[in-house]
Image (tube, coloured by chain):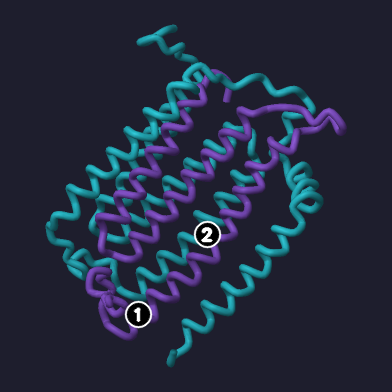
Chain colours: A cyan, B purple
Amino acid sequence: MDVAGIHVTPNLLVFGGIATVAALSAVGVVVFNNAVRSALCLVINFFLLAFLYFTLNCEMLGITQIVVYTGAIMVLFLFVIMLLNLGAPQALNEKWDPKRPIGILLGVMLFGLVSAQVFPGLMSVQATELSPALSTFGSPQALGRTLFSSYVFPFEAVSILLLIGIVGSILLAKRRI
Amino acid sequence: MLGVPLVAYLSLGLFMFSVGVVGVVVRRNPIVIFMCIELMLNSVNLTFLTFARFHSSVNPQTGLAAPSMMAGQMMVIFVMAVAAAEVAVGLGIIMAIFRLRHTVDIDEMNLLKG
């Protein structure tokens, strides 16, 4: 079935549904005045992104996305919102200022500029069927083999970064800084 | 997913990135600004994985996925680790500022203004 020159497949319809809800929830993060609602929109967005990772054959990273982002990072966000009591919309009365239309104009211009420059050359690129050797490229085995062979040094650097992050957040949480 | 063009994934990633940029510019609540930064990081992750999947090629020596196919996934792992560290420290800074000033309005934080 062809609609406006695009070959519509069932896969494309599924992708369209997921992408539409993900885009709407991304907009919801920005437009909601209440920080808790923004956080819940972000949870929906991250969850749907994990499904998009599954459609790209990256199973391991999809699971990681759900565990790390919707599990850990968003809980951290909600905790801080609760601690600072920012849930009430009147806590931070964001009144109208000229920054708002300028920012929206900037975003539209960014989208238009990048899409006009990048997309025309990639219009006809379609996914090819993965060969059996390639179909497991997102599996934990393939990921671990690469991570602990070619990427050992960045892996160790990230471990130091996370250690510094732990020490820094404990230091910042102390009563007197 | 077969039947979905590359441009569809890329335009979703670009849209989410633009929304994140608008949020960082427009909003004054630092926690929402942090969420918008997470949104941008995730849209970049989606773009990395899209290119990794669409650039399917075999390593002639091992017969497994080529390094160019794994590189995108490796970047996503590191971006996730950096994002986790960034959120932990950033939210700690917001908490410290709130204890000090009793407000989190980003427009009133002008201590470093020259």
Where residue A11 appears, x then y in whole percent? Answer: 51, 21
A10 up-or-down from A160: above or below: above
User: Label 2 amino acid?
Assistant: Ala
Where residue A109 appears, x then y in whole percent? Answer: 28, 38
How busy is the neighbourhood of tag 2: few (under 14 within 10 Å), some, or many (20 plus)? some
Residues indicated by labels 2 and 1 sit on the same polypeptide chain: yes
Q: Which mark is residue A56?
A: none
- Callout 2 secondary element: helix
Q: Which mark is residue B97?
A: 1
**Label 2 vs 1, first from the N-terminus:** 2
Chain for mark 2? B
The reply to whether callout 2 and callout 1 are in contact (CB within 8 Å) is no
Observer-nearest residue: A138 or B89? B89
Which residue is the extreme one toward the top?
A1
Observer-nearest residue: B85 or B60? B60
Q: Which mark is residue B83?
A: 2
User: Label 1 amino acid?
Assistant: Ile
- Callout 1 secondary element: helix
How busy is the neighbourhood of tag 1: few (under 14 within 10 Å), some, or many (20 plus)? some
Indicate left or right for B91 with B23 as reference.
right
Query: Which residue does the image show at 42% across and 35% down from the upper left?
Result: B12
Find the distance from the CA under tag 2 to the CA under tag 1: 21 Å
Where residue A126 appears, x then y in whole percent? Answer: 56, 19
